[in-house]
Image: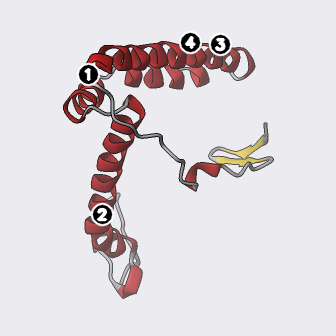
């Protein structure tokens, strides 16, 4: 762990996350009779992930504090999100594919929507930040100020 230099700034070792590397997600057809076992695999994976999150939460609580460990509660809740589970099981059953492939397809759809949203709102962010000489003007009495101010 690094040492806090001031609120919001930390000095310490940085770790490179291989998150940007594409993973090879296995995809294979699942026969009608194998679908119940495939869904059981999903349930087992969720139980295992929840157990691992519980361990991480306990370790984090002991080393960093209970408040910092609360982030894992949100992650555990996501494991049981009805929309996510319905999407994964629905894809698995409709397309007769393994759960990893169903999850990967759902993740691709969500990230595609997110990237589309970002690309469509980028001009607004540029305007608000003052890029390209533009800015949003607010009254001098306003507490909010975007971009550069003009005299």
- Helix, strand or loop at disc 3? helix
Mark with earlier residue (3, 2): 3
Q: Which residue is mark 3?
A: 58
Q: Please identify, in this view, whether the residue under mark 2 or under mark 4 is nearer the observer.
A: 4
Specify few, some or many for label 4: CA neighbours under 10 Å numbering under 14, 14-19, or 20 or more: few
Mark with earlier residue (3, 1): 3
Question: Is 122 drawn above or below residue 64 in the view shown?
Answer: below
Specify few, some or many for label 1: CA neighbours under 10 Å numbering under 14, 14-19, or 20 or more: few
How far is mark 1 from mark 4, CA to CA? Answer: 19 Å
- Coordinates of residue 13 in the picture (x, y in percent): 80, 47
Q: Which mark is residue 82?
A: 1
Q: Which residue is mark 2?
A: 141
Q: Quadrant of the N terminus?
A: top right
- Coordinates of residue 132 in the picture (x, y in percent): 38, 86
Between 89 and 121, the one lying in front of the other is 89
Q: Please identify, in this view, whether the residue under mark 2 or under mark 1 is nearer the observer.
A: 1
Q: Which residue is mark 4?
A: 51
How far is mark 4 from mark 3, CA to CA? Answer: 11 Å
- Helix, strand or loop at disc 4? helix
- Left/right placement of residue 66 relative to residue 120 reads right
Mark with earlier residue (4, 3): 4
């Amino acid at each position: 762990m690094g040492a806090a230099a001031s609120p919001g700034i930390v000095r310490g070792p940085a770790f490179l996350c291989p998150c940007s590397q594409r993973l090879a997600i296995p995809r294979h057809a699942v026969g009608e009779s194998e679908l119940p076992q495939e869904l059981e695999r999903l349930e087992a994976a969720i139980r295992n992930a929840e157990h691992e999150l519980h361990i991480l939460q306990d370790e984090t609580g002991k080393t960093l504090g209970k408040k910092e460990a609360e982030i894992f509660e949100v992650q555990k809740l996501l494991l049981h999100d009805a929309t996510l589970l319905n999407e994964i099981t629905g894809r698995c059953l409709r397309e007769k594919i393994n759960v990893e492939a169903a999850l990967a397809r759902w993740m691709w759809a969500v990230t595609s929507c997110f990237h589309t949203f970002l690309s469509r709102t980028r001009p607004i962010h540029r305007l608000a930040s003052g890029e390209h000489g533009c800015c949003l003007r607010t009254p001098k009495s306003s507490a909010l100020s975007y971009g550069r101010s003009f005299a």
